[in-house]
Image (tube, rainbow, N blue to C red):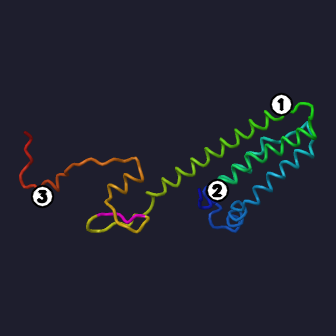
Amino acid sequence: MPQAPRDISEFVPGLRFGTTARILNIVLANPAFHVGVGLGILVLDVITGPDLRFPTLFAVPVVLCAWFSRVDLAYGLAVALPLGRLGIASYIDDPTSPTANLVNAVVRMAVLAFLVFLLAQVLRMSAEIKVLRGMLPTCMYCKRIRNEDDTWEPMEGYVSRHTDARFGQGLCPECMATHHRQPLEVE
């Protein structure tokens, strides 16, 4: 699912047009940054030894990658980082309990993958909401809307396709007076 890069100013409005915002947008959109942060956390995990572990920090590059860069790479990080931690646990920290190390790795993968899934849903819903935000190109006579394919479709169809709204038929008092000189009789 390709997505447009997100803007850091969505989170920090004061950074909207500054140099810092431009630099952060470039850095956060770069997948290599997220991989580097993940590898840095693994290195920190090795350096600190078995007494101080950092697998909770795996959420940082995974979330940043899903939000600012690519969801598919975030899923890859959600699998690769716990596998790296499994290697550290199996060969450096505690090689005597491979079953516990494997179970921990699987749980971490599941949690991180679920986190990416939730973020992907938020991104998808955010994109759907943006469809109806802003100006819609509308014919000034028939009120049809020009869609993404550059074809014109009735407003009701466009809105129904892009939202959960449904249309019912009715007649406003002005149209009743203009188009129906006599009131409609109910039998």
Q: Quadrant of residue 150?
A: bottom left
Which numbered disc, 3 or 1, marks the residue that appears first in the sequence? 1
Segment colored magenta: 143-147
Which amino acid type corresponds to the residue marked 2 in the rendered image? Val
* Separation of residues labelled 2 and 3 (CA atoms): 53 Å
In the picture, the disc for residue 179 is 3
Tell us which disc is closer to us: 3 or 1.
1
Q: Position of residue 122 (x, y in %)?
A: 57, 48
Q: Tell me if 135 is positioned left or right of 81 in this view.
A: left
Q: Tell me if 52 is positioned left or right of 112 in this view.
A: right
Q: Position of residue 96 (x, y in %)?
A: 92, 31
Give me the residue at 48% from left, 53% from top.
Answer: 129
Which amino acid type corresponds to the residue marked 1 in the rendered image? Ala
Question: Which residue position holds label 2?
Answer: 12
Which numbered disc, 2 or 3, marks the residue that appears first in the sequence? 2
* Position above or below: 81 against 144: above
Q: Position of residue 135 (x, y in %)?
A: 42, 64
SS state under label 3: helix
Q: Tell me if 56 is positioned left or right of 183 in this view.
A: right
Quarter of the image with the N terminus is bottom right
Tell us which disc is closer to us: 2 or 1.
1
Give me the residue at 79% from left, 54% from top.
Answer: 37
Question: Which residue position holds label 1?
Answer: 100
Which amino acid type corresponds to the residue marked 3 in the rendered image? His
Q: Quadrant of residue 102?
A: top right
Q: Position of residue 186 (x, y in %)?
A: 9, 41
Give neighbour class at mark 1: few <14, some 14-19, many 20+ (Cα, 10 Å). some
Query: Do the residues under discs 3 and 1 have CB atoms within 8 angstroms?
Result: no
Give me the residue at 73% from left, 46% from top.
Answer: 78
Quarter of the image with the C terminus is top left
Whether 145 is among the magenta residues is yes
Give me the residue at 71% from left, 49% from top.
Answer: 62
